Amino acid sequence: MSERSHLRNFLLLWLGLTVVLEVVVVVILGHDIPPGSMTNDTRAQHDVIVTLTAIALPVLAMVWTYLAYAAVNFRASADGPLEDGAPDRGNARLQIAWVAVTACMVLGLAAYGSIDLLSGAGSSGVGSGEGPNPLAKPANAGKALQVQVIAQQWVWTFRYPAYGGVETPMLEIPVGTDVEFHVTSLDVVHSFWAIELGVKADAVPGADNVAFVTADRTGSFQVRCNELCGLWHGHMNTTGHVVGASVFKQWIGGQESKYAGVTKQLPPYSTTYYPQPIRNG
Amino acid sequence: MRGRLLGVIASFGLLVGVVVVYFIFILEEAPPGVAASVHGTTAQLTLQTDASYGHAPYPDWVTYEARDPSGHWQHSTILKIPAGTRYVHVTVYEYDTATGLRNPFFAYVRGTVGGVIQLNGRPMNYVDAASPAHTFTAPDLGLNVPLPGIDSSAKNQCAAAPCRTSEAHNTISFTFKTPKPGNYRFQCIVPCALGFLYGFGGPMQTIGYMDGMIEVA
Amino acid sequence: MSSTPGMALDHEPAETIPRNFAVGSKVLASAVAIFFMSFVFAFFYLRALNTAHSFREPHVNPPVGWGIAILACVLVSCAALEAGRRALANGPSTSWRVLGLVSWLVALAAVALQATEYYNLHFGATDGGLASVFFVFTMWFAVFWLGSVYWVETLWAQSLRRPSTADAEIGDTARLLRPGADAALTYMYMMGATGIVAFVLLYIVK
Amino acid sequence: MESASLPVSRPRSDSPPLGSLLGFNVVSATLLAILAYYFGHKIGAVIGHHTVWNTSSDQDDDAVLIGMGFAILGWIAGLGFFNYPIGRIFGRPVALHEGNEGGAWRYLRLCTDHKVVALQYLVATLFFFFIAGLNAMFIRAELTSVHGTLFPAGNYLTLVGLHGTMMLMMMSAGVIGPLGNYLVPILIGTRRMAFPRIESLTMWLTVLAGFVLLSATLLGGFPTGWTGYAPLADEARSGIDAYLVSFGLIGISLVLVGLNIIVTVMTQRAPGMTWNRLPIVVWGFVTTSILAVLSAPVLAAALVMTISDRTIDSTLFVSSSGGSPLLWDELFWFFGHPEVYILALPGFGIVLEILPVFARKPLWGYKLAISGLFGVALMSFMVWQHHLFMSGINANLRPFYMFSTELISIPTGFIFLNGMGTMWRAKIRFTVPMLFCMAFFFNFLFGGLSGVFLSDVPADTLLHGSFFVMAHFHYTIMGGLVFALLGGIYYWLPKMTGLKLNEALAKAHFWTMFIFFNLTFFPLFVAGMLGMPRRVSSYNAALHNLNVFVSAMAFFLGLSMLLFLWNLVYSLVFKREPAEQNPWDSKGLEWQLPSPVPAYNFERIPTITSDPYGYGEPGAVPVADFGGVPAGASA
C-alpha cells in the first residue's frame, strides 16, 4: 500500500473511533459524569470536565488507532529475513503542523480556563479554595452567608459568625443562598472537601481559605478530609445538609440556644486562630 | 540440575517469605482488646487516664488503661462491647493535670444519655475550657466527654501506672446508647502529649495511648 | 587500583580530568547554591507572611559584629586561595604554600567563629521565623563551608608532596593541582556569594 | 597495538574467598553502621537532654537523628569511601580506580567500574521496588473493606508512606542508576564515568536510604505519606526521622548522579560523538540529570528545615510562631514536580532508543525529541503550584500555573509524535522490549490526558487529592516509567549480564502486567471522581465493590510482577544461557561490544562515525570505527 492510502485509512479509522467515543462518552454517558448538579459549583465543574473529555477523546482515539494500525500493518513478517522500514528521519512540515496544532489546543484550553477563572462573578473557580482574597466570587458575594470551617485532628466544626459566632459540629446551609466558606485549621494541614457541593479548600493553620457555593436543591452531602492529616485522616468525615431557608433559620436558632454556654467560652470570631504551641519543659 | 532448581526456588521463596512475614508482623501490631463487663443490658467500661508515667516502650506518654472483667488494668484502648446491650456506662478515673482545650467547643458534653456527665457525682453539661486534661471523643458516635484534670498542686498524685483510687483523681462517668455493631474510633482532643511543639504527636496519634476503638459486636 | 588495563589501552586525553574538575565544580556549586536559595526563599516567604506577627520577635537581633567577622573570614579565605592559585602558575611555589595555608586557617576560623557566635546569642531557634531561618541558614552554611576547608587542605597537602609518578591512565597527577585549585575556587566563590547574601538578609535586612 | 597483552580482568573466581570478609565491604559497612548508630544514639540522648529543653525521651529525635548521622558515616566508612579522601588530606595524588578486582566480591563493595555499579544499582533498586510493591499489595488488602479493619489505622498510614516514599526514591534512582550508569559511558565511547568513586557512593547511599526508610517500621512509623507535609511531620513520631534521612540521602545521591552524568557527557565523548549523534537515551539521562541537580537540593533544604523544627525547635512550619506550613508545600513541590519528570524523562529516552531498533527505522524527528526532553525539563520548574490550587494561594496565580501546566503537554506531545513517526511504515518486530514500549505510549497517554484535567482549576476542584490523582500518577510513573524501565531491562540486561532472559516468561509477564495494570488503575480514576480521597483506610460504602475489584486486579498485577522476578532468578541464577553479542540486530554502539562488556569497554577509544539510527538507509555507515580492532574480538 502506498503512503497515501495508509494515511487515508488511518485518518478514516481515527475519525470513526473518535465519533464512536464522543457519542458513547459525551453524548450518552456525559450526563452521568461526576460531580452531579446539586450546586452552581458542581454544574460548572461538570461542564468543564465534559468539555475536557470531549477534547481529550480525539487524542485518545488517535493514539489508539495509530498503535493498532501500526501493529497490524507495519509488522515484519514473522519468520522472513530481517527487513528495514522506510528510512525517513522526519518531516519538517508535519512537525511544525504538530507543534502548531498542539499549541493551539493548549492555548485554547488555557484561554478557556483562564478567562473562566478571571471572570470574577459566575466563574467556575469559586468552589475551590482561593485564599483570603478570592478572585472568583458569586455576583452578590457581599451578602453571602459566612460559614467558618474549622479543621482539627480529626474533627470538623463549623462557626456561623452571623449567628452569634455559634460553633457546631453539624454543617447545614440554606438552599438558594450564596455561602462563603472560610476554611482554617487549628493544627496541621487538612482539606475540606464537600463532595456533592463541589467545594474543596485546604485547611491550613494560620491561613484563611475562602470558597463559595450556591446550592440549587436540598439534600445531604459528604464532607471528607482530603489532605493526609494523621492517624484518623480516613475517618475524618461528616455529613452536611442543604435545607430550605426556614428550616435553616430554625436549625441555627436551635444550635445557638443549645450551645449558648460554650459559645461564651469561644475566642472571638476570627478568620484565623493561633493556638499557642504547647511546650512542656 | 533439578536439585539446583529446587535450591533456587527454595531460597527465592524463603527471601520473599521473610519479607512478607516481617511486614505482616510489624503491621498487625496492636494492643489486645478489653471486653466490657455486662450487667443486665448495660455494658460497664472502666478506664483510667494516666499522665506521663505509663508504659514501655514510651513510659512518658499519656495513656488510657482499661479494666478487664477480672478487675485487672490492661494497657489497651481496644474496647469490646457486646451488641446485645442497650447502654454503655463508662467510668473514667482521671489522674492527669489539666492542659486546656485548643478549641473550647469541646468543653461541651455531647452524645451521652441526658447530655450530661457525672463529675465526681455532680452532673455537668459543659466544663471550663481550660480544665480538661483529656477528652473522650468518638466523632462517629457524636460523643464528646471532657475529662477535667486534677489540681496540679494536689498532694498524693499518681506516679506509676496503673494508678490507684487512693491517689488524686477525678471520677467522670457517663452513659451512651450502644451503637449499631461496628468499629468506632475514639480519640482525645486536648493537645496533651508531652513535649511536642504542636501537642498532637506521639500518644495522640497512637492506638493504645490516646486513640482507640470501640468495637461493638 | 591496578585493574587499570595498563599499556595495552590507549590513554584518555590529558585534558579530560581538568575539564571534569571544571565542569563538575560548576555543577556542584550550582546545586549547593540552589540549596541555599531555598533558605533565601524561606526568609522572604515567611517575612512576607509574618504569621501571627511573629516573624521577627523584638529581641531577635543577630549581632552584626559577629556576622561581619564570619563573612570577612570567608571572603579572606577566598581571596587568599585566589592569590595562591595565581602563584600556582609556576608550580607549587613557596608563596602558594603560604597563601594556601592562610586560606585554610582563615576558613577554619570562620567555622570556629560561627560556633562561638551561637554561644553568645540572646535568642534561640524557637523565637519566631527570623530566628528559625537564621539558625538553619547559618548552620548549614557552616557545614557546607567545611567542604571548602577540606578541599583547600587537600590541595595544600598535595602540593607539599614530591611530584608523583605518572599513573598509567591519567599521567602525572601534579599537573592536576592547578585545575583542582580552580575547581575549589568555583565552589568557594559560590559560598562567598552565599555568605554575602546570608549576611545581608539575616543581619541587615532582618 | 597488540591486543593479546591485555591483562584485564577475568574475575579471578566466582566465589569470594572468606578472607575478603575482613576489609571494606558491605559486611563491615553494616556492622559499622549499626555500631555507629548506637554510639550516635547515646551521644544524641545526652545532647538532647542537656540542650534541647522540650524534647523528652519519648520523642528522642536528637538521639535518633544523630544516631542515623553516625550510621551514615559508619556505612560509607565501612565500605571504604573514606580511604581515598583521607589519603587526599595527606596529599596522596589523584587516582581514578578503586576496588575493581576481586571477582564477584566486587559487587559487595566500593567498585569504580561503572558496569559493576550499574548491576549493583539494578539489584538494589529492584529489591526495594519489590518491597514497595509488596506494601502496595497490603494497601489494597486493607482497602477491600470499607472501614479498613485489617491493620490498625496508624500502621496503614505507615504502609502508605513506605510504599510512596520507597517507590519515589527507588524509581528516581532505579533508572538513571542502573541504566544511566551503564549506558552513558558505553554509548558516548568512554571507559568510565567522570567521577567513578562518587558514582559508587551514590549507589551505596541509595541502598542505605532504602534500609533507613524501612527502619521507620521500628521507630513507630510515620503518618505523612511521601509528601511529608508540615506540620504533621513536625509532630509525628520518630519514624518520620527515617523518612527525612532516607529521602535526604536519595536527594544527595540524585544530585551526585546528575552531576556525574552531566560532566561525563560534556567532557568524555569519544571523537566524532557530536551532539547530533548522541543517542536519545543519553539525552534522556542528561535532561534528567539537569532536573536532579537543580531540584533535589531544594528537597534537601526542605528536609533539613523539618529536621531543625524537630530537633532545635525552630518554628519554620509553625504558623503560631512566625512560620508557615505553606513554606513546606512550596519547597517540596518545587522539588516534587521536577521529581515526577525525573521519573518520566529517562522513560522517554529509553522508549525512543528502543523503538527504532524494532521498527527497523531511523528515529523519526531526533531534534524534536531532544527539544521535547528539554522543553519538559525546563518547564517542569514552572508548574509546581498546581499542587497548591486548593491550598489558598493567591488566586491571581492560578491562571498562570494552569497555563504553564497545560503548556508542558506540548513537549510531551513531541515524544508521541516521535514514537508515531518512527512506527510509520516500519517493519515492527514484536519482541518483549518493543511490546513494553508500545504499552508505554498506551499508558502514558492516559497519564498525560488526565493531567490536563488536573491542570484545570474547576475540574481540579473535584479531582485534587483524590484517587483520580493517584491513578493519574500511577499511569505516568508505573504505566510510563516502569513499563519503559522493564522494556529497557529486557533489552539491555543480556548485554549487562551476558545472559539470556527467558522469552516465554517475559511475554507472559508483559501481557499479564499490561492487562492487570490497566484493570487496576483505570477504575481508580472513577473512584476519585466519585469522591474517594487518597490515603484513606475508610471510604464511602458505595465504592466498596469498585475497590474490591481493584484490589483483586492489583493482586494479579502483583503476581505478574512475581513472574518477572522469577524470570530474573530462573534465567540469571539457574539457567545462565549465554547471550549473543547482538541479539536484536541493533546498530547501537553497545551492541557492537561483547556480551558482557569487558572491564575496559573499548580496547581503543572508537571514533564515532554515525548516529545509531541508520536503519534501512542506503548509505548508512557503522556507528563507530573501532580503530582496526574487530568489534568483540577479545571476548
Image (cartoon, coloured by chain):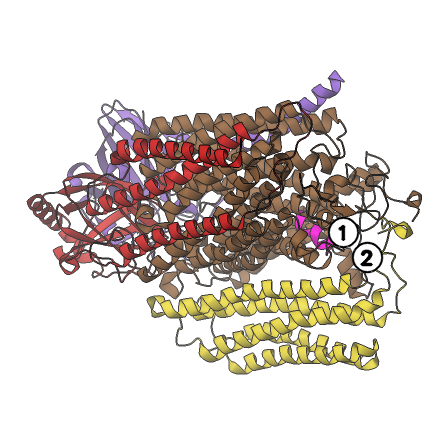
Chain colours: A red, B purple, C yellow, D brown
Residue D119: horizontal and vertical position, in percent?
70, 40
Compared to residue A141, the image places residue C100 above or below, namely below
Compared to residue D438, the image places residue D252 above or below, namely below
* Lateral position of residue A48 relative to residue D105, left or right: left
Residue A114, image quadrant: bottom left
- The circle on residue D190 is 1
Q: Is residue D151 visible?
A: no
Residue C51, image quadrant: bottom left
Q: Residue at x 88, y 56 (%)?
A: C168
Q: Which residues are magenta?
A: D193-203
Q: Secondary structure at mark 2?
A: loop
Q: Secondary structure at mark 1?
A: loop
Residue C133: horizontal and vertical position, in percent?
48, 68
> Badge 2 local density, few (<14 within 10 Å), some, or many (20+)?
some
Give the residue at mark 2: C12
Compared to residue A248, the image places residue D303 above or below, namely below
